[in-house]
Image: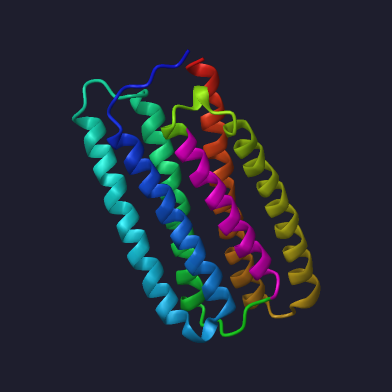
Amino acid sequence: MLKLGKDDSFFDLLETQAKIAVKAAEVFLAMVKDLERAKTHTDNLLAIESEGDEITHKLQNKLSGTFIAPLDKEDLSELSHLLDDVTDCIESVGARIGMYRLTVCRPDIVPMAGNLLEVTRVACAAVTELHNQFHRSKSLPGVLVKIHTLENESDRLYRTALTKLFDEETEPIAILKWKEIYDRVEYATDRCETLANVVENMIVKYA
């Protein structure tokens, strides 16, 4: 049976990172629904991304200075970097919408952003369950399955969006811009699924 160390601060930092990723996804969804205030949203995303970086650095510095961590340092570091990747990727999507001077969003991006928000929320729940010592958790397996389900839905939305983009858009530059945006949203969702895979491996590793 898994016995976690008693230093909860590592888990507190991971939970904070997960909540920051959720906050970024919330702002991104608001942004694609309200491009008239794109600058405000991109500024908010940049601030959130900076907040996430600060927490990532705190966790990595704590790992460096800790002789015995509650879990393997490699596992904690990987989870931290995955959560940071999600926030960074969301911020980069918002930044590109601003840089590309997009004033009207294609309708496909709204459900993609909504799905991204949902998967970050479920990933946050998975991190919370980890904090609650996942060997006792009855809900964690279902949480991880939900992440995989949402990632599958993201794949479907992504393929549909690309198909419509290539069918409907005739301007090559517009195609390139929107494809990159779709790609980055899909990548952020993929990082959440990778997090689920890491947690699943940890369950086996520490069983």
Q: Is residue 123 left or right of residue 51?
A: right
Q: Nearer the viewer, residue 4 or 111?
A: 4
Q: Position of residue 137 (x, y in %)?
A: 54, 28
Over which residues does the magenta segment extend? 107-129
Task: Check the image and name the residue furthest to the right.
Answer: 167
Q: Is residue 202 visible?
A: no
Q: Is residue 179 visible?
A: yes
Q: Nearer the viewer, residue 73 or 71?
A: 71
Q: Is residue 109 left or right of residue 47?
A: right
Q: Give the main secondary structure of the magenta stretch.
A: helix
Residue found at x 61% / y 83%: 104
Q: Position of residue 1 (x, y in %)?
A: 48, 12
Residue found at x 49% / y 35%: 129
Q: Nearer the viewer, residue 63 or 128?
A: 128
Q: Nearer the viewer, residue 137 or 108?
A: 137
Residue found at x 75% / y 54%: 156
Task: Check the image and name the residue furthest to the left.
Answer: 65
**In the rendered view, how is the structure colored?**
rainbow
Q: Position of residue 30 (x, y in %)?
A: 53, 73
Residue 131, compared with residue 172, is above or below; it is: above
Q: Position of residue 187 (x, y in %)?
A: 57, 52
Let me know if residue 128 is in the magenta part: yes
Let me know if residue 206 is in the magenta part: no
Residue 202, compared with residue 35, is above or below; it is: above
Residue 149, compared with residue 93, is above or below; it is: above
